[in-house]
Structure formats: C-alpha cells, structure tokens
Image: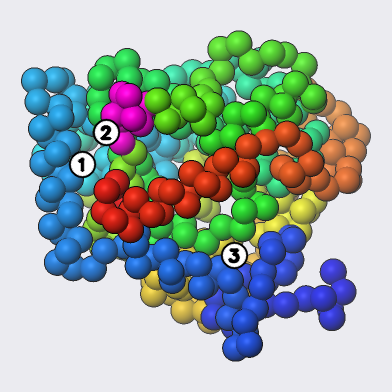
C-alpha cells in the first residue's frame, strides 16, 4: 500500500491495511468506532437495567428447562470467553450441557483446559467429532478460494452443531461466549459468512475434493426454523454482565487452573496459524487490531497500550516455521503448494455465490428486535 493511500483512525487502531473498508470522518474517527458506539447502546445495557434483564433471562431459562436434565447448552473451546461462560452459568444456578466441536485442530492445552474446567464445575460434555476427510476438503477449499475468511467453516459447523443438539434434547437456550464488548469491531470483508451455507458449500464444490455428507450445516431458513418453530434462542450472556476480559483471565487462572494459549482463539491450532501467519503474510490483515480496538472502545485499555502491543509482529519466526510445517503436514501438501496458495490472487466472498443480501436484511431485523427488547442481546 502506498503511503498516500494509508489512513488510520485516531480513536482506535483500525487502519486501511488489509482492505478493511475503513472510512474516516472529518475528525479522523473511523466508521468502526461509530458502528461500535451505536450498537453498544443496544447490545450493552446499563446498570440496573442490565441486572433486571439478566434476572428475567435466567428465570426464563430455568422455567424452560423445568423437569429436564439440562436447561441450556454452552459451547466450550478451552478459550477465555467460553470458559468464563461455563463458570457464570453454574454460578447462576443453571444446568448446562457443554458441547465441544472437535474439528481436528485442538491444541493439547485447550483439551486440558476443557477437561479441568468441566470436572471442577461438574458439567456434562457432548463432543462432536467431525469427519476429518470431509472437513479437510472444506478447509483446504477455502485456502484455495483465497478469501480472508478461511475460518468460516469451523464457525458455521459450531453454530449448526449447537442448534442440532439443542433441538435433539429439546433445549430452548444456547448460551454462547460471543460478546459485543470485546468483539464488536469486525470488517465484513474479513470474516463474512458463518451463517451463509450457500457460500460455504459453493466454495467446497468448486475447490474441494469431497462432498459434504456429514458436516453439520444449516441454511438460513433452517436457522429460522430452529428459532421460530423450535423456539431455540441464542444468548450472549456476557452482554448481560460487566465483562472485563483481562480480569476474567486473572480469575480463571487463579480459580479454575486455566492456562493461557497466547492469543485470542489460539486454543485452535488452525486459528493460531491462520491468524498469525496466513492473514498477515497473504492478506495484510492483523486481526489483533479488531480485538484491541474493541478493548479500547470498551474502556479496558488505552490506544497507547494497543499501539505498543502492535509493535511486535503477529507471529515470531519460530512459530511461522512451525505453521508452515504443520499446515503442509496436516493438509498433506508440499511446501511449493502452500507457497502457491500464499501468492495466489486475493479474492472476496463477493466473488462467489452467496446470500449476503438476505443476511443483511436479517441482521437489520435482529437489531430492530433487540432495540425493542423482543429478543436477547
């Protein structure tokens, strides 16, 4: 990128690198800041309204699960957010069934974190293990598709799996570790499509070598059926508490024997290598910027602290070498094939068949319903 084409926000750490779609106003504040501030007024309630909404929600969950073994489902990955959610729901007197989506990329540390957590909190676990040959075909198809949203297959599989299991056990509430406070900054071009099955299956059909016969999936309309016919609700419980991720990490280490894995969502080795190596090397994307920007806007850190962290590279030379070795071995490809992927033309989800227009309408509808207090935040 030419220096004259570069632009950066004066409030957060988002900039124009990686084709982020940044737009600055006359004061140098970016569109991501404006969007975050606007949506936070809807997604993040103030006290005491927040506590009152949480009490109503917990009572509703308990009532829905009356006479059943479980009253909610929680996803567990071994990461900070999902681990803290597990702790919270037990503290609130809920009876969760933990679900883990095993896509073949778990780090040993993540597995250890999950095992210790669930034993300590006495929570039952359901593990969904994907067909590795199918999933490898799908993941590699996205690498060849050359878009920056290569982790979308895992995200889609997790959501579809959670809804399928909720429907199977007749559980009406899924409680996720997603939270707007620390994840509310995201360029659409960087991570589109976790609900767009048309896009996902199209990329696999074009670049994959196996049909997706067993991979858990759901079209937009199937998600709507889960929501309106099965009345399954997805709740981001961390939006209902004063969630401080830095304090949460300290608490988990001191009380639940949780161990850090070095980066956001790095409990997955694929996330570690994709975000630390593929995104910055090929796409010029440093995903730390979105996480740090959200922490700035939520008041957890200062811009100066974020800029200091960004002075270090996303991944060091040793881990880069490790990433190349691991990816070639896992996908059974040569170093040359990986180099060809890393230097191929950059594409976007818009270059493939998708349902982005429908999803945009649905997201706008969801924000309206949240604004009216008709669905959980």
Could you say whether the residue bearing mark 3 is in a helix, strand or loop? helix
| Placement of 131 over or under 28, stated as above or below | above
Q: Residues within 10 Å of mark 1 (few under 14, many from 20)?
A: some
The one of 33 and 154 positioned closer to us in this rendering: 33
Q: Which residues are magenta?
A: 226-233
The one of 223 and 346 positioned closer to us in this rendering: 223
| Spatial CA span between label 3 and label 2 | 32 Å
First in residue order: circle 3 vs circle 1: 1
First in residue order: circle 2 vs circle 1: 1
Could you say whether the residue bearing mark 2 is in a helix, strand or loop? strand
Residue identifier under label 3? 289
| Residue 245 in view here | no
Residue identifier under label 1? 89
* Residue 34 in the figure: left or right of residue 258: right
Could you say whether the residue bearing mark 1 is in a helix, strand or loop? helix
Residue 173's tag is 2
For the view shown, which residue lies furthest in the top direction? 213
Q: Indicate whether residue 368 is drawn in magenta.
A: no
Instruction: Please name which of the two marks, 3 or 2, marks the residue nearer to the observer.
Output: 2
| Spatial CA span between label 2 and label 1 | 12 Å
**Disc count in the image?**
3
Name the spot of residue 254 as percent of width and height, x first. Answer: 26, 53
Name the spot of residue 119 as percent of width and height, x first. Answer: 24, 30
Q: Residues within 10 Å of mark 2 (few under 14, many from 20)?
A: many
């Amino acid at each position: 990128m030419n220096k004259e084409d570069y632009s950066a926000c004066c409030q957060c750490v988002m900039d124009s690198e990686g084709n982020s779609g940044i737009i600055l106003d006359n004061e140098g504040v970016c569109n991501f800041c404006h969007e975050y501030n606007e949506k936070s007024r809807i997604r993040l309630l103030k006290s005491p309204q927040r506590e009152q909404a949480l009490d109503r929600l917990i009572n509703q969950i308990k009532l829905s699960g009356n006479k059943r073994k479980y009253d909610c489902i929680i996803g567990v990955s071994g990461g900070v957010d999902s681990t803290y959610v597990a702790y919270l729901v037990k503290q609130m007197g809920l009876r969760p069934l933990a679900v883990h989506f095993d896509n073949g990329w778990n780090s040993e540390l993540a597995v250890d974190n999950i095992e210790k957590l669930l034993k300590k909190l006495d929570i039952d676990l359901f593990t969904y293990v994907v067909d590795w040959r199918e999933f490898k075909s799908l993941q590699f198809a996205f690498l060849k598709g050359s878009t920056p949203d290569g982790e979308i297959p895992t995200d889609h599989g997790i959501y579809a799996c959670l809804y399928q299991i909720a429907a199977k056990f007749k559980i009406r509430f899924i409680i996720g570790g997603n939270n707007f406070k620390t994840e509310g900054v995201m360029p659409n071009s960087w991570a589109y499509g976790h609900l767009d099955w048309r896009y996902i299956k199209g990329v696999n059909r074009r670049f994959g070598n196996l049909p997706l016969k067993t991979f858990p999936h759901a079209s937009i309309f199937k998600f709507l059926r889960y929501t309106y016919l099965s009345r399954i609700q997805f709740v981001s419980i961390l939006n209902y508490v004063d969630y401080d991720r830095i304090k949460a990490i300290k608490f988990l280490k001191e009380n639940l024997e949780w161990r850090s894995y070095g980066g956001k969502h790095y409990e997955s080795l694929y996330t570690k290598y994709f975000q630390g190596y593929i995104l910055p090397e090929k796409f010029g994307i440093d995903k730390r910027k979105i996480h740090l920007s959200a922490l700035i806007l939520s008041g957890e850190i200062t811009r100066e602290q974020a800029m200091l962290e960004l002075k270090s590279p996303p991944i060091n030379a040793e881990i880069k070498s490790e990433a190349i070795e691991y990816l070639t071995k896992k996908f059974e490809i040569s170093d040359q094939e990986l180099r060809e992927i890393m230097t191929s033309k950059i594409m976007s989800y818009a270059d493939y068949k998708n349902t982005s227009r429908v999803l945009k309408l649905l997201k706008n509808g969801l924000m309206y319903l949240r604004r009216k207090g008709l669905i959980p935040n």
